[in-house]
Amino acid sequence: MYYHVKSLYHIIVLYMKYVIVGSGPCGLSLAYTLVQNGHHVELIERDSILGGSWNSQWIEEKYWSENSPRVIPKSLITSSHFLDFLSELGMYDADFAQVYGSLPTTISKLSGFFTNHLSVTDMVKFTIAIGRYTLFDSNKTLQEWLDSTTISKKGKKGIKIFSILINAHPRDTNVNDFFSEFANIPPPNLVQFKQPNKWHQLAEAKIKNKAQIFKNTEIIRINSNESRVTDIITTNKKTGEVKIHKGDRYILAIPPPALITLVSNCNVWVKNNWNGYDWLKDWGDRTYYVGFGFQLHFRENNKTMPKEWCWSCHGDWNVIIEPVSDWVQKKSKDPLVNSVWSCCIVDMDAKSKHTGKTPNESSKEEIIAECMRQINANIGPETITPYKITQSEGLYRKHDRWMSKNVGFTRSNAGYLEMRGKIENLFCLGCQTKPAQPSIALATGAVEASVTFLKEYEPNTKNAFYYNGNNKRIALMCILIVCFYMRYKKQN
C-alpha cells in the first residue's frame, strides 16, 4: 500500500497492490482497470495464455479448438460491460460476426424453434411464466417449474433443449435466470469474435508494462491469519519455481470447483471464510456444469449444415454445434482443413438409448463415436465424415465423472457467493457474484462482477471502461428523445 500526493491542495490518493488469480473476462477487466488507475497488480494465470475459458487453442499446433461453442449478446440499443470493455481495448463492430445471421433472422430462427415445440396454449403459459419470474424472485430450478406446469410433453422437451443450449440442464438452471433471457426488449443479436484471442491479447499488450503477469502458474496455498491474507504461494508448472506473492488485496477470479480445490489446501480460516467449509463444498458442487467440447475438421470448403436452428440438439445428448469456420478468420493451420464445427455436450448424465450409457459412464472415444452417431441421425439423409476430430483441452476424469479445467457457472437453487467473507482482504469474483438483474451466466456477468467490486471497494476509480459505456448509453437515449420530440413536434 502506498500514497501519492497529487498537489498541495489535493487529498492524498491511496494506491494498493492487488494479487489477482485468474485472467478470464472478470480477472482481466479488473486488472486492466486497476493498473489504469495507478494500482500495482500481479496477475496469476495457470495456462500459457490469458483469457480463461474465453480463448482458443491449437491442438497439435495446427487444429483450432475452444472450450465450447459460445455467443455474445449484442443489443442495438443498450450495451453490456463486457462490450464496453472490448470497446475500450480497441475492438469494434468489424471484429464481430453474426452467429445466426441478422437480428430478424435470429429472431425468426428462435421463434421457429419454439413454435415447433410449443402449442398456442403452451405459449400462453410460457408467457405468463416470463412475467412472473421476471418480476418476482424464486429459489426454484427450471426443472421444478417444468414438473409443476401443465405445458405439453413436447413443449417441455423444447424448453429443456433450450435450457441446455443457453446454460445447463433444467435441474441445474435457476428459473429466474432462464425466463429473464426472454424479457430483453428488443432482444439482442448473437455475435462472436472473428479472432477469438484478440481481446485478451489487446488487454495484455496494454497492461504488460504496468502489471506483473505470471503464466503457467498454479496456486499452492493461501496463507492467512484470522482476519487477513498474508501471502499466496505459487509454483511455475514449467520450471517448478516457487514464489511468494504479497499484496494488500487478493482477488480469486476463478469458478467454484477451482475455488474449492484451492481452499481445501489452506488453513482453517481460509476454509471457513465463506459460511463454513462444508457449506462452501456443497455450494460449489451445485453451481457448475461441464461442457465436453470437441471439434470436427472437414476438408470440404464451407461445409454446410441444416438450416433448422439447433438441428443437432434433438438426440439423447443434445449435441450443440456452431460452424465456427463461417466467421473465424484463422480456422486451421492444416492446409487440408477448410471447415470447422465447434461442438459440445453439457448434460453428462443423459443416457443414450443406443449405448445404454451416459457420457460420464463413457470413455472419450465412446463419447465421440456416440455424438457422431447422433449428429448423423439428425443431419440426414447424407452422413458426415470429418477429416479430423479434436477434443477441447483440460478434460479429465475425477471421481468417475468427466471434469474440465474450464467449467460454466449456474446458480441452480444454491444462490450466489458473497464477494468477501470473514477475511477482510480476500475476495472471490466472477459469474458467481450476484448481478444487478437475474441472468444466465455469461462473460457479461463476469465483467459485471469486476465493475461491482470497483464501485464498492474502489469508488474513486476515474479511468474506467464502464463510464465510457454509460456515456454512450446516455448519448443514445438523448438522441432517441430528440428524435421522438422532433417527430411529435412535426405531427402537431
Image (cartoon, helix red, strand yellow):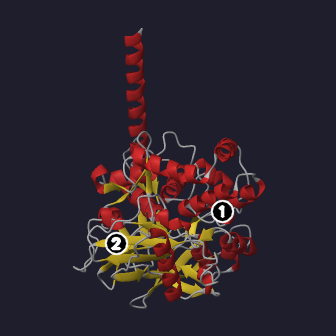
Q: Residues within 10 Å of mark 1 (few under 14, many from 20)?
A: many
Placement of 399 over or under 190, stated as above or below: below
Instruction: State the residue at coordinates (39%, 69%).
Output: 55
Nearer to me, 249 or 22: 22
Q: Earlier in the sequence, mark 2 or mark 1?
A: 1
Indicate the amino acid at tag 2. Answer: Val
Residue 475 found in image quarter: top left
Left or right placement of residue 110 versus residue 382 in this view: right
Left or right placement of residue 35 versus residue 144 in this view: left
Instruction: State the residue at coordinates (54%, 76%).
Output: 231
Q: Is residue 402 visible?
A: yes
Indicate the amino acid at tag 1. Answer: Pro
Instruction: State the residue at coordinates (52%, 81%).
Output: 370
Residue 360 drawn at (x, y percent): 61, 82
In the image as oriented, which residue stretches furthest toward the front?
A: 381
What residue is shown with label 2?
Answer: 340
Residue 135 drawn at (x, y percent): 68, 41
Instruction: State the residue at coordinates (33%, 63%).
Output: 207
What residue is shown with label 1?
Answer: 170
